[in-house]
Image (cartoon, coloured by chain):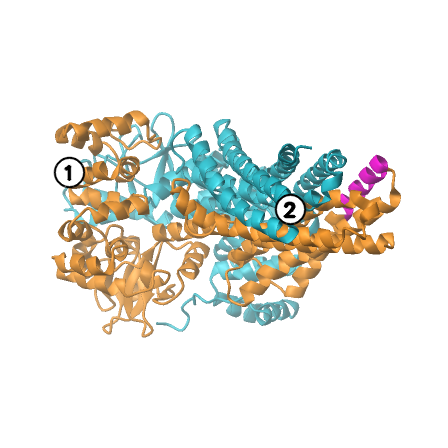
Chain colours: A cyan, B orange
């Protein structure tokens, strides 16, 4: 194994960043190039993300565009945006020429509208220019927004030998050949072949004899998330994209899907934690505040609601002050149960695991919540009874707890199912939304039931 | 496009399931086979997951093992386990013969130890048997546990023409040829080639002239999550696995990595929602209780802690009963801020986005929490002041709120960073754990600060 082999354990160290900064300061281009040449472009992107803007632009201008185009694709989006602002339309066009059409379109889409056209005008390869312009027209959340124009296409009438000759030319343009797509003379998708099939076949065989017609494909306007689900479910590494007339337009590869799945998971996770928008730990305080404050404000309103409820019960419970001390417990349990049950449903919906009727789900959650609630209530009953010696209060608190847990579980189950049926992303129902509404409702229910049991 | 083409919009309908059940009841094997032949194995697996055990076993025994082996791999794990219990060792061995070594080893690993050996003994292909036995020895959470033995391997001394001839044989065994791995005569990994390189090359060229030596690889004992991160970062579709002497042992493909990433995201999401263990919406009430009850119990203990704290402050605050009504608000805010800040850190750690010092993180979170806290506190101050007309109480509550939010943010930031440094999965710090500890601490801090400000 060569010593140069990229090591799986690439570690971004302060020393490395300082070394790069020193070379930039000294304008020691030769040493800097030698140093960076050792690293994979994804690692160089990590280094650049640590540099200041001026330094990052210096490195981008220093290295050749074959490498820097890949580096730019791997950089943090915010940093890339800043670097691109410091490059001329001509320089960006040079980067874009090196990229596959899907990545090229993504980069251009990040620019302001005025600059988009300026960059496109500077692209020299007319075919590349036309393809990128086509891709820019698709919504980024659709199959069209994910696909690349680079693919290997053969006609059903060709022979294996002719095919091998012809695809030698096409394949040079395509980074990874997953499948060879077979079309008829109207450019309609007929089926596919693998390179392996072609190699294993005899050279005089006709493509139409080898083609696998049972091919998965997606329509250009299909939702990106649905494409990701299909590719993950059927273990596809690439999928062809066709228009409404079955004309082959492009292909989507699994690495783009990995990104879609990851973004989706990150978004749901953040939503459950009460964070909106696509923020990262390294974003500015202002960006993070914008993502976090609205949910905290919702929590504040919930807290004020709880305050008003408790004040409303103040007189009725003047002799039972101890009951007020259990409101944080009731609120916490209502919130926790609600988050648990909504998370299970949201995840099940995302994985297409939630089958059967809404009623069935609700009955199941009711039984589950009742079981959990009774176990917890017995424990709470014993604690209050033994600690305070007041069996009536212990009973009132425990019975309320069971009721609160059941209702919280039902709300946590129903709300995401309801939102999903209405076409709203159910993930919004997790986290602070469900916690806050369950807090208030739980506290209200608690005092109401306690009041009944204690006969106030 | 053939009418048989698998449709992206496969929908599991009740009618379809009932149709399958009817054919089974009628023992109408011919119609059942014709019906199921239309579907992809992943879709048949979805249908089988809806049938009862007897029906599912009936279908598995009916279809040929080439299809059923793939169906079994796609089925829900619990259902697969039950079906396998109803198959003989011989029948399982027949399924296993059809699978790639990695899937075969996964299936066998799910059986009881006694049955594992019985099934292995029934495998007829001696090479397959030896390879599966080798794979079973690796920990499932390592590169060895993910890899398959199927790969295309050539020696550096071969020519392109010789290579093409030889790999025709090997390629038949391998479902997808991502890369051709080049080894030296000691079987040590030298580099790789793509099929495309081979097709584009001249037939008399030597492999050693074409080989790309700068190849990524992983060691057989590397952690599965690390392998997933590397493959996602470098956009790899397959990666070779070597032992400590650089001997080529197997390869891992991107579809396995998609599963690892998905499981990891699901686990973190559930952990944040207070659910442990790998449960799904369709699991039994008992399984779901086991996953949910421990966290609820933690919440209950937290609530009892809050009760004890409030009781302790009862006398001091006898004239300020209104302050007790704000404890749910304080607890909710402490919990929400804690969950937000811990989620950002946990996600950042998972994505390797968290760089820089712990102190830097804490200072940033402190500033962020202070900003959010002051905005929220001003609102709360105005509410209490205008609603109750008592400026001293309004001040006490608002100042406490800022302090509670800052402390909650710091705890939410520190705990996952601390756990990560100690080698513990930081995801455990999200959800009920951080909510409960922040609840108690928040309430304690609130009364303590309020007491100071009001001079009690």
Label 2 element class = loop
Q: State whether residue B343 appears in this view.
A: no
Q: Which residue is mark 2?
A: A390
SS assignment for the magenta stretch, majority: helix
How crowded pointer 2 is (Cα within 10 Å; few <14, some 14-19, many 20+) is rated as: few
Q: Position of residue B211 (x, y in %)?
A: 31, 64
What is the quadrant of the C terminus of chain B in the image?
A: bottom right
Most foreground residue, B211 or B297 = B297
Q: Could you tell me which chain the residue with mark 2 belongs to?
A: A
Q: Position of residue B138 (x, y in %)?
A: 31, 65
Q: Which residues are magenta?
A: B374-388
Q: Nearer the viewer, mark 2 or mark 1?
A: 2
Q: Could you tell me which chain the residue with mark 1 belongs to?
A: B
Q: Which residue is mark 1?
A: B62
Q: Is B302 above or below relative to A346?
A: below
In the picture, measured across the screen, residue B405 lies left or right of residue A165, that is right
Instruction: Tell me how many marks there are.
Output: 2
The residue lying at 52 percent from left, 66 percent from top is A36
Q: Position of residue B7 (x, y in %)?
A: 31, 31
Q: Is A279 above or below relative to B58?
A: below
The residue lying at 82 percent from left, 46 percent from top is B320
Residues beneath discs 2 and 1 located on the same chain: no
Q: Is residue B381 magenta?
A: yes
How crowded pointer 1 is (Cα within 10 Å; few <14, some 14-19, many 20+) is rated as: some
Q: Position of residue B73 (x, y in %)?
A: 27, 47
Q: CA distance from mark 2 to mark 1?
A: 65 Å
What is the quadrant of the N terminus of chain B in the image?
A: top left
Q: Is residue A93 magenta?
A: no
């Amino acid at each position: 194994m060569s010593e140069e082999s990229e090591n799986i354990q690439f570690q971004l160290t302060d020393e490395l960043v300082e070394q790069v900064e020193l070379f930039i300061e000294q304008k020691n281009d030769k040493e800097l190039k030698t140093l960076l040449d050792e690293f994979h472009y994804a690692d160089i992107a990590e280094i650049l993300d640590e540099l200041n803007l001026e330094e990052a632009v210096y490195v981008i201008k220093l290295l050749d565009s074959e490498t820097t185009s890949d580096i730019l694709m791997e950089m943090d989006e915010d940093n890339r945006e800043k670097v691109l602002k410091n490059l001329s339309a001509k320089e960006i066009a040079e980067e874009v020429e090196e990229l596959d059409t899907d990545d090229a379109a993504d980069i251009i889409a990040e620019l302001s509208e005025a600059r988009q056209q300026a960059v496109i005008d500077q692209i020299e390869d007319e075919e590349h220019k036309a393809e990128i312009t086509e891709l820019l027209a698709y919504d980024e959340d659709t199959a069209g927004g994910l696909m690349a124009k680079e693919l290997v296409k053969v006609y059903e009438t060709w022979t294996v030998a002719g095919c091998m000759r012809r695809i030698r030319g096409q394949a040079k343009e395509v980074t990874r050949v997953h499948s060879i797509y077979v079309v008829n003379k109207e450019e309609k998708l007929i089926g596919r072949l693998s390179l392996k099939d072609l190699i294993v076949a005899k050279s005089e065989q006709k493509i139409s004899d080898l083609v696998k017609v049972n091919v998965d494909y997606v329509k250009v306007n299909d939702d990106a998330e649905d494409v990701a689900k299909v590719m993950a479910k059927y273990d596809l590494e690439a999928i062809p994209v066709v228009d409404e007339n079955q004309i082959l337009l492009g292909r989507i590869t699994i690495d783009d899907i990995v990104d879609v799945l990851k973004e989706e998971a990150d978004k749901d996770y953040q939503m459950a934690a009460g964070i909106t928008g696509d923020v990262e730990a390294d974003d500015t305080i202002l960006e993070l505040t914008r993502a976090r404050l609205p949910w905290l404000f919702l929590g504040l309103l919930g807290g004020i609601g709880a305050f008003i409820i408790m004040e409303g019960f103040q007189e009725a419970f003047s002799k039972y002050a101890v009951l007020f001390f259990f409101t944080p417990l009731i609120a916490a349990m209502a919130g926790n149960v609600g988050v648990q049950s909504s998370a299970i449903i949201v995840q099940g919906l995302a994985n297409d695991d939630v089958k059967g009727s809404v009623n069935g789900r609700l009955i199941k959650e009711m039984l589950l919540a009742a079981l959990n609630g009774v176990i917890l209530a017995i424990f709470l009953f014993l604690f209050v009874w033994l600690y305070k010696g007041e069996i009536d209060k212990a009973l009132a608190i425990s019975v309320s707890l069971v009721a609160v847990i059941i209702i919280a579980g039902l709300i946590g189950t129903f709300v995401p199912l309801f939102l999903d049926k209405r076409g709203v992303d159910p993930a919004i129902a997790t986290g602070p939304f469900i916690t806050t509404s369950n807090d208030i409702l739980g506290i209200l229910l608690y005092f109401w039931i306690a009041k009944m049991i204690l006969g106030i």
